[in-house]
Image (spheres, rainbow, N blue to C red):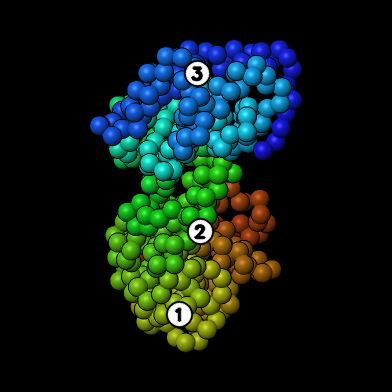
Amino acid sequence: MRLKSTSREKQQDFLEHLKSLFQDPSALVPECIDGGLLCPFRSYEKKLSSARDPQDFSKYSRSADQILAGLSETFRVLESGSAGVMGVLKTQFGSVEYSKRGGATDDTVLAGIQHYDDPLWRMLAYSSLVRTRNVRVYSSSNFFLGSCKNSSPGVEFFKDVLNDENAQFTSNGQEISIGNTGHSLTISHLRATKIIVYENSTLNTINLLLKHILTPDISADFTFSCDFLSKTVDVIPQNSLALYMQGKINDRTFIRDTIDFRTKEAVRLGHFIIGDEAFTTAAQLVEKFPFKYVPDDVIINALSSFGKGFYIDAFSERKILEILWPSHGKQILQQVFPEATQDQLSQLKGSPLDQIDYLQSTIKGKNLRESVEVSGWSQDSKFLVDLLMDYFANGQDRAIRNAERNLGNSNVRKALYFAFLDCLGEGGNRSWQFTDTEKDLAWKIRDHVCAMVKNGPGSMQQELENVKIFIK
């Protein structure tokens, strides 16, 4: 206990305050919301109401009942007419001053008695009773309630508490909401009142509530649930919960700690977490998010044998393949491309999608070449054949990109390339890249190149014969 001296003015105010207590000591007793014949609150109400004179409390000086003994000791303070030295009781929610006169009263009980009309401190008078009789006390500006049968005070009490604490909230029936965006934490009190706290709240809601509640078992009164992965991993991180209850972290941090904890736990259990969803089987994941580059049965087999879970914030086939690739990449490629050779597989580089794309184009181009018996008669003509085969197998963008890599310094290749671009409607945009000589040759072969582009691989043999006139 820390001591503090007080001024004469403060002494006088304090003594006047105690005088008001003994004019109506029953003001110290909360209204019991569920009491019966053996209700301790009603028992105190009868005893305190029956006291006709403050002197009546003198007989309780040696009482084992802490509240009665505390009233007796408080009366001695009033009777002495002096409170020059005050004790200071420190609590989790602040400090409160009180006066002691050598009695055996618990300091917390005594402080509560002497602050009988304070919305916060008056319930401390029942701290001993709460420990020994399993009762609960609820106190706010407009409510002073007791419960001896584990009853919740109701939503109006909690609204009053939040108003006392200047906390912004909304209410709908038996539920109170704090914040409005992000994931949510539901704080339930004795399964009767629910307070839904959203991730954008920077308060510490549980501490605001506990500040106004005296209970023998906080963990029995309050339960916590979070909407994130609630059907899969319904656990609360106990270390974070302890910090939250102690007021060391706020709502937002506690919710995010819970999200992180559940994510890690779900991954440890082998679940696949995508954003806010958990998939316990590969089939569930593929059903919700179809894959484009890998057939469903192949990806299901790979995920099922992966042996562990993963988390990604949004669905991405690329990210999932990158997760699987170190252990299952070769297996996936062999299943998707059974015709691929070991030499082709061993030389693959880049990301999984790059490797799939490369094999896809290589094998498709090979199959196309095998179905169309055409070949070049020179390096330049071979460039044109490769360019057109690439276009038929892999599309315009890849054909243009690959052709640019293979142009070299050959004016003939540049002419062939310009003719091809012009057939695609791209010649005008790039004509500045080519010389007049290259353009002249391009115009001579353009119609034949365009015929192949338009009519497909089947037209190549005849049209190449026509081009052969202009290219050695």
SS class of the residue under badge 1?
helix
Q: Earlier in the sequence, mark 1 or mark 2?
A: 1
428 vs 71, nearest the viewer: 71
84 vs 31, nearest the viewer: 84
Q: Is residue 169 visible?
A: no
Residue 209 location, x and y as percent? Answer: 47, 34
Residue 57 location, x and y as percent? Answer: 48, 23
Answer with the quarter of the image where residue 202 lies: top right
Q: Say which of marks 3 and 2 sits in front.
A: 3
Quadrant that contains the C terminus: bottom right
Type of the residue with mark 1: Lys
Type of the residue with mark 2: Asp
Vertically, is 289 above or below 47?
Answer: below
Vertically, is 249 above or below 15?
Answer: below
Q: Which mark is residue 318?
A: none
Measure the alpha-carbon separation of dots 1 and 2.
27 Å
Q: Which mark is residue 330?
A: 1
Q: Residue at 61% of width from left, 15% of height from top?
A: 15
